[in-house]
């Protein structure tokens, strides 16, 4: 069966992109990275894509008069590459309602917290300051509000005594690299159905979507 064509939007180091590339290296994985698109020409993620022989595009946000023109240019690149699912992976531009609606239920994001806790930036620092005992990451469909939308996969990690932002972010990132390929797999296999604000998972009696560091 044809694999689901992914467009991965990046701005930086691209470790989540790498997790998707590595997952898709298995021919049995039901999705493939068709295009890596960056708003920043210097993003290290682009080198990862090139090293894997994946098509890249650079659409610099500064090169357009306004956000609609920028987003239409990105959409043209994605559609020309036959992308069916857009994955945000460290893409550091806020997307307009037009883009979010255009890609409705075909646009997902990974966020480094257990949403709805800690939307926005500096999630690891804020988790430490709040004293939560568990932290983690969330893969979700994108809606117009930032870091909001039906949740596909979450993974939790403990916050340990002596943790600093570096240690905690590394522990979460390890789980991000498991959670993102799992979320893509659930969608590509047609096992994730959006019902209102929820994702209902099908075809599994023990949902694999609550990843646990112990498993
Ligand atoms: C990750 O922590 C992701 O959750 C957040 O941005 C970071 C991107 O890291 N949205 P990378 O570029 O995938 O390494």
Image (cartoon, grey):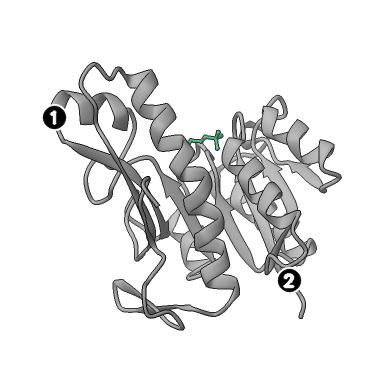
Disc 1 residue crowd, few under 14, some 14–19, many 20+, Cα 10 Å? few
Residue that appears at 53% across and 44% down: 177
Residue that appears at 27% across and 20% down: 163
Circle 2: element type: loop
Q: Disc 2, ligand 1: is the CB inside 8 Å? A: no
Vertical position of residue 37 compared to residue 131: above or below: below
Disc 2 residue crowd, few under 14, some 14–19, many 20+, Cα 10 Å? some
Q: Residue 121's image quarter?
A: top left
Residue that appears at 47% across and 52% down: 179
Q: Which mark is residue 202?
A: none
Question: Residue reaching furthest front?
Answer: 214
The spot of residue 119 in percent (x, y) is 28, 42
Q: Nearer the viewer, residue 102 or 37?
A: 37
Q: Which mark is residue 3?
A: 2
Q: Whole-Å distance between the Cαs marked 1 and 2? A: 42 Å
Say which quadrant the N terminus sits in.
bottom right
Question: Residue reaching furthest right?
Answer: 53
The spot of residue 141 in percent (x, y) is 43, 62
Q: On the image, numbered disc 1 is attached to which residue?
A: 130
Vertical position of residue 160 compared to residue 146: above or below: above
Circle 1: element type: helix
């Amino acid at each position: 069966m044809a694999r689901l064509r992914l467009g991965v939007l990046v701005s930086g180091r691209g470790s989540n992109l790498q997790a998707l590339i590595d997952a898709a290296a298995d021919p049995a994985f039901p999705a493939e990275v068709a295009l890596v698109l960056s708003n920043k020409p210097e993003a290290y993620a682009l080198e990862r894509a090139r090293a894997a022989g994946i098509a890249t595009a650079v659409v610099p946000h500064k090169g357009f008069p306004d956000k609609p023109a920028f987003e239409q240019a990105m959409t043209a690149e994605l559609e020309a590459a036959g992308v069916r699912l857009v994955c945000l992976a460290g893409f550091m531009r806020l997307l307009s309602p037009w883009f979010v609606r255009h890609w409705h239920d075909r646009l997902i994001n990974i966020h480094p917290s257990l949403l709805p806790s800690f939307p926005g930036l500096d999630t690891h620092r804020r988790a430490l300051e709040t004293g939560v005992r568990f932290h983690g990451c969330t893969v979700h469909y994108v809606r117009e509000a930032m870091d909001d939308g039906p949740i596909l996969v979450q993974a939790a990690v403990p916050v340990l005594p002596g943790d600093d932002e570096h240690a905690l972010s590394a522990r979460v990132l390890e789980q991000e690299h498991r959670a993102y390929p799992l979320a893509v797999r659930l969608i590509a296999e047609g096992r994730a159905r959006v019902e209102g604000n929820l994702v209902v998972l099908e075809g599994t009696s023990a949902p694999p979507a609550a990843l646990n560091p112990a498993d």
